[in-house]
Amino acid sequence: MFDYQPATDLLADRHILVTGAAYGIGREAALAYARHGATVILLDRDVTGLESVYDAIEEEGSPQPAIYPMDLQGAREEDYQQLATTLEETFGPLHGLLHNAAQVRLLSRIDDYDAQTWFQVMQVNLNAPFLLTQACLPLLRRAGDAALLFTSDRVGRRAKAYWGAYAVSKFGIEGLMQVLAQELRNSPIRVNSIAPGPTRTNLRAHAYPGEDPQEVKPPATLMPLYLWLMGPESREIRGQALDAEALLQGEGG
């Protein structure tokens, strides 16, 4: 059993960018990071959802967060560069980046995929993390101690039929993580991925509409892992594809 008890000031004075922050794992991670002292930059296309997270963080008395609405599906390279410029001007160094935004769109045979759907999934799940990481690397390097964390999926490590573009995009995320981990192995930036396993999220509900959500673990269950991987106590963990289910059940990563 993974039993991590983070200090209340684990992330004090750190700036952390979370994508897909409006709901699910992203929302819970943003709340957890803020509770442990971080100034969190909330990124999502859903402004109403972002405002809800912002208000929740404020009500808890955590450091004031920031909202950055952005639609990853339609964002261009210059949009990511502008985001990085804004972050630098407002916060300076970036101590953490959690790539959590993703979409599944549909479960289907490869035979039946239309090109537009395939491209849209790849844009959000793979191209956006690449472009955002590339834009933010100078800010992460300036931090002196930084974490780059990708939310992955088991189907991105061992494929399953009908998961199509989503699975392929997550394989790509694992490859991106490994390349970055090797390139940054002598830098202050540690790079890892985590497969959450079945979790009560909108993405899960879309993929399994007949499932009782109460039978699936809530995102809060994952937060000790997300805190550990984002905090300085995991600085020796690099290039690891971690399995949350295995760790939570005491089976190792």
Image (spheres, grey):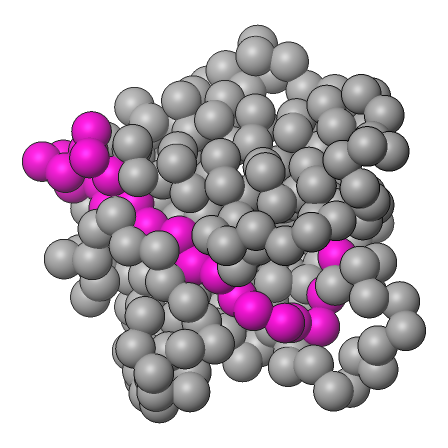
Q: Residue furthest left?
A: 186
In this picture, residue 127 sits left or right of residue 176: right
Residue at 42% over, 67% down = 243
- At which x and y percent is residue 68? 64, 36
- At which x and y percent is residue 17? 48, 44
Query: Which of the 4 image quadrants contains residue 124?
Result: top right
In this picture, residue 179 sits left or right of residue 156: left
In this picture, residue 106 sits left or right of residue 193: right
Residue 5, relative to residue 87: is it above or below?
Answer: below
- At which x and y percent is residue 118? 75, 28
Query: Which of the 4 image quadrants contains residue 248?
Result: bottom left
The residue closer to the viewer here, 154 or 22, is: 154
The count of marks equals: 0
- At which x and y percent is residue 24? 68, 63
Q: Which quarter shows the C terminus?
A: bottom left
Q: Is residue 191 magenta?
A: yes
Q: Is residue 236 magenta?
A: no
Q: Which quarter shows the N terminus?
A: bottom left
Residue at 33% over, 27% down = 137
Residue 194 in view: yes
In this picture, residue 177 sits left or right of residue 40: left
The residue closer to the viewer here, 43 or 119, is: 119
The residue closer to the viewer here, 131 or 82, is: 131
Q: Residue furthest right?
A: 210
Residue at 74% over, 87% down = 215
Residue at 52% over, 49% down = 156
Residue 184, relative to residue 229: is it above or below?
Answer: above
Q: Residue furthest front?
A: 111
Residue 36 in view: no
Q: Which residues are magenta?
A: 181-203
